[in-house]
Amino acid sequence: MKDATPKTFPDLPERLAGLDELAFNLWWSWHPEARMLFKMLDRQLWKESIHNPVKMLKELPKEILEAAANDPEYLRHYDAVLARFRHYVGTRGEWFRENISDPDSQPIAYFSAEYGLQHSLPFYAGGLGFLAGDHLQECSDLGVPVVAVGFMYPEGYVHQKIREDGWQEGSDEILERDATAITRVLDESGEQLVIRVPLIEPDVHVAVWKVVVGRVSLYLMDTDIELNNPWNRTISARLYLGDVEQRLRQEIVLGIGGYHVLDKLGIEHAVLHLNEGNPAFVLLERIRERVAAGMSWEEAAREVKNTSVFTTHTPVPAGHDVFSFPLMEKYFATYWPSLGLDREAFLQLGINPQAPEAGFNMTVLALKLAACRNAVSQRHGEVTRAMWHGLWPELSKEKVPIGHITNGIHVPKWLEPKMMLLFNKYLGPDWLANHDDPSIWEMVEDIPDEELWRTHFWLKNKLVNVIRERTRKRWIEDHISPSIILAEGAMLDPTVLTIGFARRFVAYKRANLILHDRERLKKILNDPWHPVQIVFAGKVHPADMPGKHILQEVFNAARDPEFGGRIAFVEDYGEQLAQYLVHGVDVWLNTPIPPMEASGTSGMKAALNGVPQLSIGDGWWLEGYNGKNGWSFGGGENDGDRDRKDAEALYELLEREIIPLYYRVSGHGVPTGWTRVMKDTIKSNAPRFSARRMVKEYVEKFYTKALRGLEKG
């Protein structure tokens, strides 16, 4: 097998041939100097392409490229970036090679239903996908040998539109495969590789595509090909299909089909890592292969179990996929004999003892067949051990064999370039290479308050300008009502204390908590001397009616003149808008019902950029809060009055601490008390909640053990 030669750009001069190579490796997405290489060619076209170098190079006029090929200043920058890029991809990465006893071992196969890498590749729905994307990018930086498998969702990205009454509507965006950093994988005859997936009749075939993420390869499966009948073509159409049978078929393709993709490519892997339960059927196929080679079920299951890692992200029982027994029989009745199992033994693999009649549970399957199991925060570990205690009834809840590795974020990806320049200046020349070392971040104290505040205020202005530009564009293109323009942020003021709330609008996240006492909130927002404004953003799953009603409530509050234009809802939340928000707001608000926030990563991204948290004590914030780096509130028992109590605690913090601190400025116009909190936010959170720390923990706790083969677990 071989990869297709990347799509060429006919007008690209030979002197700039490296731009082709660079555009098809997402390394550029977390290196500002590489992005600048494209931006320097044509700033407006870079903006119009939505920061997509492949699309930009396809549309760039020939004369601009020829001028760049003869511009000494551009060529100096080009040569420096290409040299750095080629050195990076041409080496293995220092950390893994130096710290692992067998650095030449076979790779870890990472399976996930979604990947959040860059907004030109819409293979994600939310935090789970961005966690997977950050994991791959950090594995690339550290040289951890990983190969990843997932889906390409050609209809998976839904643009959000808000009607004048505040109701969310969606419009699909069909992915332009030839205008993104994706390449076809070719077979021996030079055609795109297509494989057949077992179990499903009539046959399902998947075409294989590849995304290069630094040193890591991500293989994506696509069922939207002519070989498939219409129903099968839609298996990979979009994330998290609503039809239960089609969802089961999707997970068969992800797990079993993904396993066969790696096999067809000749990629042998030593360890499996499942990001959530969606791909758990890959464990069965890995066992089946060993049984076919002569092992017993017990021997094969033990070997696979001892070399498999399972990460669960969902503390809500309803969030785990469960399929009816008749549906499982329909697809697996001819499969379980090849495992050496009968019907009862096979179905027992997915039965939750606490709800045996519910059906076949994918999380239970993964927990039973992976010896390395983890939740994604300390608190989530406690919740998960209690949730799945029934699988180990002989043990106390504390001894249930599910650990935790708290999520982290990929620092180079989420750090704003102007903040990076500030850190380059004051943290020392090697800070980025060692950014999981807490001692390095003590140098944040050397950043003058004036410089930190000036940088933050510039980013805040940028955020406000971006929001205004988005509303102006909608006004021109869609001729929307003036009330929508006002609700979407046309009246935002960069001098005002700005609270950000941006995440999926699901009921447990309580986006509307701050609206609980509207009269009190109006006084807070409209204070003539110390005003406050709130920026909301987030999407609702199309089938989530409660979430849509909460979004409508927030949007209509933004339209309410009595709030004085101090509330904005910015529609069509995605990775690019998330970047602006976590960089530019003053406070990051998080209000989940505990303990339903498994970890959360958006607040980590804000904290890295000096934005303090104002959060319920749940998820990662229970580990991150130290009394000086933000504010924690609420989180008590549900006595029927929790929302009111949490809202009052939130208002109290705003009125008594946060607002006075923000507006207390020195003679130089700098809120030095606020910059003190910003520095504590960065110092305490940046190293601890980095993907570098997280990936190192996966390697040290799980990957190295799995590479050796764990003892019977």
Image (cartoon, rainbow, N blue to C red):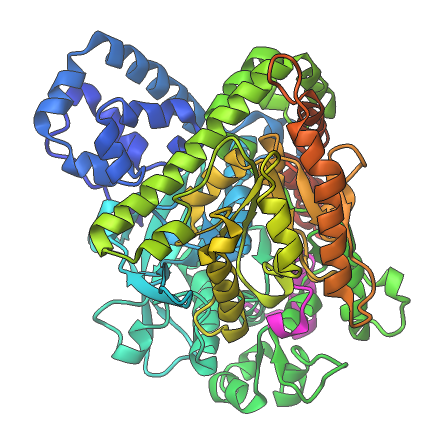
Pick whichever, 239 or 644, lies toward us. 644
User: Going 9% across and 28% down the picture, which residue do you hit?
Assistant: 62
Report if residue 687 is visible in the image. Answer: no
* Residue 81 screen position, x and y as percent: 36, 19
Pick whichever, 170 or 569, lies toward us. 569
Q: How many marks?
A: 0
Question: Which picture quadrant has residue 326?
Answer: bottom right
User: Going 42% across and 31% down the picture, which residue do you hit?
Assistant: 462
Q: Which residues are magenta?
A: 293-320
Q: Is residue 317 magenta?
A: yes
In the rendered image, the residue lying farthest to the top is 72
| Left or right: 161, with 275 as reference point | left
The quadrant of the rendering that contains the C terminus is bottom right
Pick whichever, 91 or 557, lies toward us. 557
* Residue 6 screen position, x and y as percent: 24, 40
Looking at the image, residue 330 lies above or below residue 383:
below
| Left or right: 615, with 169 as reference point | right
* Residue 537 screen position, x and y as percent: 48, 52
Looking at the image, residue 144 lies above or below residue 322:
above
In the rendered image, the residue lying farthest to the left is 63
In the rendered image, the residue lying farthest to the bottom is 326
In the rendered image, the residue lying farthest to the front is 528
* Residue 207 screen position, x and y as percent: 30, 61
User: Going 66% across and 16% down the picture, which residue do you hit?
Assistant: 666
Q: Is residue 700 magenta?
A: no
Report if residue 567 is visible in the image. Answer: yes
Looking at the image, residue 88 lies above or below residue 248:
above
Question: Which picture quadrant has residue 492?
Answer: top left
